[in-house]
Image: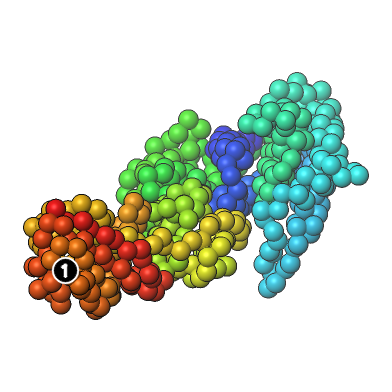
């Protein structure tokens, strides 16, 4: 009697590859969710194997009652039960490790739903590697002992499975050269949900090893027709949270089936072709920001009824709004009082909709994705704090007043000017020279103008409201070569209020 090993093993290989790839990424909400997806799939697969093993042991019982198979069943069933005992012991030990990790990560159970700090990295490191009783070393030894004991149940088992049991105790490849031991490569600074997923992977390996041995022993009694009676759809996706242009991978299949089931899969009507592991797969680049749903349609043959059946499943994912990689002032590296200071804010790998900011000196107003206007309160310093998916990062800024403008007539800041050029000017301007903000403006609200020298004896002066020369136009028309014009007590309004700016003097020629 042959178990439908191939599709299940292909699924497990794929899940493990996904897990290994995810361990190389920065931990964020979408990555934690991807670990949850893989962990759920591994647990579902283990449950399916349990059902198959239960069916095998039920068949053993039936064969013990049959005179034709009683003798052989009595010989091989105890060995199968020993394989089950070994598997149950190590499986339950791994399950206790998972519970300990959850508990020390703040496990709470409400209405049957478990919650804990999935992104906690210190707990797995302490429990599995650095504590007084590091469990990773114990886990390694118990897995090794389980594998050896399973093979040693019978010489024929060892001969058949010495090089093929799915308990792999080699050190996995890691990007961190410091994680050069088995326990460090799997568990050092690993988020709790990732450590639990790794443990679920080992539990699945244990169940697979048990299933292979029990199936082998059952076949020693005599081949029987085995028809699966439970079907477990297997839907996986590389992430449910992406940025524009990133690739989304959806894998789909049907578990607990033999080769006659021959499932066919489509995603939104597009056929899913088998990948290198034999699992139907569809790849596509996601579009702009927003939430999306893909429909996975699976058709398979039910081996109990010999009828074609089909099921639909929804795969949901979110495309985030991309931003930069830090907080930067768009216009300058300081914040100016009295101005709307535009800044760009990034949450790194976290989408904009999960980013908020605050400032301890002024106000912050969001204008669009990743864009804010800052209005600082007083000169000195300000700290903008970025909260990206619950993690806060401070960014310090200097806060300064907008510099004083200078007075100009036309394009001149004073000095020698031709008489006719001066007469052609409309008034006094207040200009911010070499200031990085475009559109920041000061307006002259009043000034005093004094005429001396040629044509003005005694001198003449006027107090003028506004910036224009219209109230003193007749005096300006009397200017000649040798006239000196002084514009003093200039007041200009702009960011921060009204300011006094230095006088300017023109010597006409």
Q: Residue at x 64, y 36 (%)?
A: 1
Residue toward you, 134 or 209: 134
Q: What residue sits right under mark 1 in the picture? A: 456
Visible residue check, residue 239 = no
Q: Residue at x 75, y 21 (%)?
A: 159
Q: Position of residue 169 (x, y in %)?
A: 74, 30
Q: Position of residue 117 (x, y in %)?
A: 69, 59
Q: Position of residue 330 (x, y in %)?
A: 40, 53
Residue toward you, 492 or 190: 492
Visible residue check, residue 289 = yes
**In the drawing, does residue 150 fall left or right of residue 361?**
right
Q: Tell which residue pokes out farthest to the top in this image.
A: 159
Q: Residue at x 63, y 47 (%)?
A: 42
**In the drawing, does residue 153 fall left or right of residue 290?**
right
Q: Residue at x 62, y 40 (%)?
A: 23
Residue toward you, 314 or 254: 314
Identify the coloring.
rainbow
User: For residue 451, which quarter of the picture?
Assistant: bottom left
Q: Position of residue 29 (x, y in %)?
A: 56, 55
Label 1 residue SS: strand
Residue 134, above or below 392? above
Circle count? 1
Residue 308, above or below 380? above
């Amino acid at each position: 009697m042959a178990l439908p090993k191939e599709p299940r093993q292909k699924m497990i290989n794929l899940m493990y590859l996904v897990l290994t790839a995810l361990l190389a990424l920065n931990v964020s909400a979408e990555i934690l969710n991807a670990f949850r997806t893989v962990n759920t799939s591994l647990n579902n697969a283990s449950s399916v194997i349990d059902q198959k093993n239960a069916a095998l042991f039920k068949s053993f019982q039936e064969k013990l009652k049959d005179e034709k198979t009683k003798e052989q069943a009595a010989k091989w069933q105890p060995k199968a039960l020993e394989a089950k005992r070994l598997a149950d012991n190590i499986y339950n030990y791994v399950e206790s490790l998972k519970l300990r990790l959850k508990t020390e990560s703040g496990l709470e159970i409400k209405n049957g739903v478990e919650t804990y700090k999935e992104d906690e990295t210190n707990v797995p490191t302490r429990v599995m590697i650095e504590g007084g009783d590091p469990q990773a070393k114990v886990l390694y030894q118990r897995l090794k002992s389980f594998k050896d004991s399973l093979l040693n149940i019978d010489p024929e088992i060892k001969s058949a499975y010495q090089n093929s049991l799915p308990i792999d105790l080699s050190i996995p490849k890691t990007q961190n050269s410091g994680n050069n031991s088995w326990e460090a490569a799997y568990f050092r600074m690993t988020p709790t949900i990732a450590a639990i997923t790794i443990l679920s992977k080992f539990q699945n390996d244990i169940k697979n090893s048990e299933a292979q041995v029990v199936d082998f022993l059952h076949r020693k009694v005599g081949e029987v027709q085995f028809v699966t009676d439970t079907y477990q759809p297997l839907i996986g996706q590389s992430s449910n949270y992406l940025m524009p242009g990133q690739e989304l991978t959806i894998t789909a299949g049907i578990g607990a089936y033999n080769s006659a089931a021959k499932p066919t899969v489509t995603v939104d009507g597009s056929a899913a072709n088998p990948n290198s592991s034999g699992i139907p797969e569809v790849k596509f680049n996601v579009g702009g920001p927003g939430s999306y749903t893909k429909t996975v349609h699976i058709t398979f043959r039910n081996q109990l009824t010999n009828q074609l059946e089909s099921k639909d499943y929804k795969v949901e994912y979110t495309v985030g709004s991309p931003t930069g990689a830090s907080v930067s002032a768009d216009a300058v590296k300081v914040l100016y009082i009295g101005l709307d200071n535009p800044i760009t804010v990034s949450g790194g790998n976290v989408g904009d909709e999960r980013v908020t900011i605050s400032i301890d000196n002024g106000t912050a107003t969001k204008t669009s994705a990743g864009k804010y206007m800052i209005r600082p309160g007083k000169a000195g310093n300000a700290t903008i704090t970025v909260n990206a998916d619950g993690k806060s990062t401070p960014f310090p800024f200097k806060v300064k007043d907008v510099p004083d403008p200078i007075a100009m007539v036309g394009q001149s800041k004073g000095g020698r000017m031709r008489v006719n050029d001066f007469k052609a000017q409309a008034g006094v301007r207040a200009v911010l020279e070499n200031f990085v903000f475009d559109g920041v403006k000061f307006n002259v609200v009043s000034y005093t103008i004094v005429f001396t020298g040629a044509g003005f004896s005694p001198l003449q002066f006027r107090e003028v409201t506004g910036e224009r020369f219209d109230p003193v136009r007749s005096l300006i028309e009397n200017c000649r070569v040798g006239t000196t014009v002084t514009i003093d007590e200039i007041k200009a309004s702009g960011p921060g209020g009204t300011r006094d700016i230095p006088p300017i003097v023109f010597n006409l020629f």
